[in-house]
Amino acid sequence: MRGIRQLAKHLDISIGTVSRALNGKPDVNEETRKRVLAAAEELGYVANQSGRSLRQGTTNVIGLMIESSKETVENADNFFLGLTGGLQSVLSRHKLDLIMLPCPNDEDPQEYLKRMVTRRVVDALIISATQRIDKRIDFLAKAKIPFVALGRSSSGGNYSWIDLDFEGVAASAVDRLVAKGHRRIAIAVPSTDVNLGYIFLDAYRSALERHGIAYDPALVIRAKSSEQGGYQAGDELIRLDPRPTAIILIYELMAIGLYRRMVEAGIVPGRDLAVIGFREEPRARFLQPTLTCFRMSLRDLGAELAETLLATMPAYADFYPGGARNTIWPLELVAGESDAFSLDS
Amino acid sequence: MRGIRQLAKHLDISIGTVSRALNGKPDVNEETRKRVLAAAEELGYVANQSGRSLRQGTTNVIGLMIESSKETVENADNFFLGLTGGLQSVLSRHKLDLIMLPCPNDEDPQEYLKRMVTRRVVDALIISATQRIDKRIDFLAKAKIPFVALGRSSSGGNYSWIDLDFEGVAASAVDRLVAKGHRRIAIAVPSTDVNLGYIFLDAYRSALERHGIAYDPALVIRAKSSEQGGYQAGDELIRLDPRPTAIILIYELMAIGLYRRMVEAGIVPGRDLAVIGFREEPRARFLQPTLTCFRMSLRDLGAELAETLLATMPAYADFYPGGARNTIWPLELVAGESDAFSLDS
DNA sequence: CTGAAAGCGCTTACAG
DNA sequence: CTGAAAGCGCTTACAG
């Protein structure tokens, strides 16, 4: 007998009025509202979410799905935690809460998603690590669950997504290296089916062709997106003959492993090999020579994700007009020393 | 009219029976159960969680609270994601789901916790980053919400916690350094009020005294638990006169910044300065010389956390007898090259 | 401006 | 073994 009923009894007032007062409905006497608010505060009353959800048909919770596969865990860094601040800054305007949904390794991501969605734990979802073919997108679209994807995919039709500007990064990395005289430019891409690998590689290829440099599949190194992967990529790199004079990494932490392999081989990054990383990262900031890479605000990206998501939710679409949105998120070059030399050829 | 009612109508059976069949209650005809399960699968029916929660009074969801302050975001690494696998491996046995609750920076952790708890979004909680005085613990105890803390605190009475073996780590680090002839051993501890800083420092102090070495407050360097912090700690270290010959870091990523500062100063870690880090970390694995540090399984820790939590929940206590538990989680020394020299004195 | 009542989707005593 | 009914805690038309 705790809950709104008890609070109402305490105030000697009906539960309907209590509810209206608490929820800021206009048709409540200001005096009454104050009394209700004060009593709620005093007794520590907060509406039971299950009761609300059941009645309203919404949970007021937004889920951020995370695939906690071994590789993700090692590499996600604090990418996701970095997003939460921005996401919450927008969601809190609408009294929506954010929860993170870590998909267990041994559960199929689509099954997990389906379970969370059909159980109605969340009103809407943010998914990430989109695969080239991603069944989750089709499922969410079919189930009419509002969602936004962090990452493009070939799946689905007209859905909202935000993706990093892989094209811009690849183009500006290649441009920069070519301007410094490089012609044999290697690239490290993920060994998995994650869509960004394809996009990045395509963009690299186009950029090369724009400069009249033939695309050479031998210079594409597939590696894990980790330090270990960077070490392995370095290993492959030094075996290439003739050796590339530059390498573009899709994942900045690879630089740490790559540097280490280079040093072992007596190759000095920034002098014998130009290196360009991807996202600027506190962890890579201490590399020597400093890494040329690209900067973005995770917080701003989080906020944009939230707004894009809300735009797809009928209840909030009015605040964020425009409907389904597709955004390419720009990154800004941060010049370091790792590619600060020119080739004398 | 979707939901269990629709499913029941489809099967031409009562909703009560459908519910019992779905929930594995014994008093259901096997034939009926099969039909229900098949139909549920076919129609993609999953019980609405709000309905269940409201009726049962439980959500079957366990929350892992994360404070996403700027410092945590930069430093948490994948500590939390690393825990989720182990947590889920245990929780899934009881059909409990895990969600992560990121507390916004601008919200008081206790208020956030209170809101989540009173709204009944979760049945129980795992909290971390315990402060020396942590109001959350008192609140949860008073509200009778089952919880387990990752980290000890001076707050609260008899509650369940698991904490890393800071005493063991400090003792074995000091023992090892003393055995190699070090007497001036510095230590880097967090600049915040997080409880582990106090525990670690106390243990370091006792270990020194055990070896008859006087405790010197000047050798205690307060720094942020990050690479930047490591760099600053290094900066302070080289200003100390006489300079310490060894340093123990409470956070392994500090080693990256520390190394960098040492190299700038012409001091070679592993030759001129002995360094011992804390938790082994993929990120620090590529340091040269390799870092002496301590190993633990995040997955196992997650599993232990889950079992400890379930032991405090009336509905599950039978499976995990023993009541409130306090566990010191051991770490195993991984010898590296960063302290592999002896002082000739 | 307020109260009484319906009903969101489920589970679970209670009859039979 | 099954069905009919109550009720979990809320919000919201509907009267007044």
Image (cartoon, coloured by chain):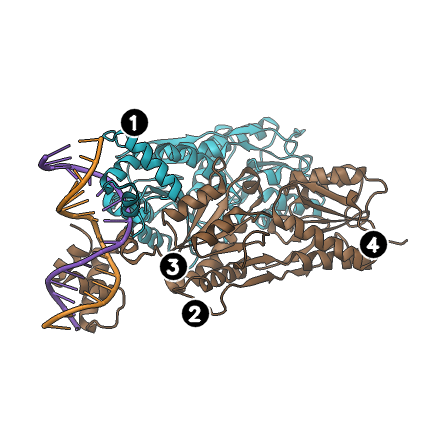
Chain colours: A brown, B cyan, C purple, D orange
Question: Of C6 and A260, which appears nearest the observer?
Answer: C6
Closer to the eye: label 4 or 1 = 4
Q: Are marks 4 and 3 in contact (CB under 8 Å)?
A: no
Closer to the eye: label 3 or 2 = 2
Q: Given the image, what chain letter belongs to the residue carrying mark 3?
A: A
Question: Of A141 and A245, which appears nearest the observer?
Answer: A141
Q: Which residue is mark 4?
A: A213
**Alpha carbons under labels 2 and 4: distance apart:** 48 Å
User: Mark 2 falls on what kind of element?
Assistant: loop
Disc 4 and disc 1 on one polypeptide chain = no
Disc 2 and disc 1 on one polypeptide chain = no
Q: Residues within 10 Å of mark 4 (few under 14, many from 20)?
A: some
Q: Which residue is mark 2?
A: A319
Q: Position of residue B49 (x, y in %)?
A: 32, 46
User: Mark 4 falls on what kind of element?
Assistant: loop
Ranked by sequence position, the earlier of labels 2 and 4 is 4
Q: Which residue is mark 1?
A: B321
Q: Position of residue A113 (x, y in %)?
A: 45, 45
The amino acid pointed to by label 3 is: Leu
Q: Position of residue A323 (x, y in %)?
A: 49, 66
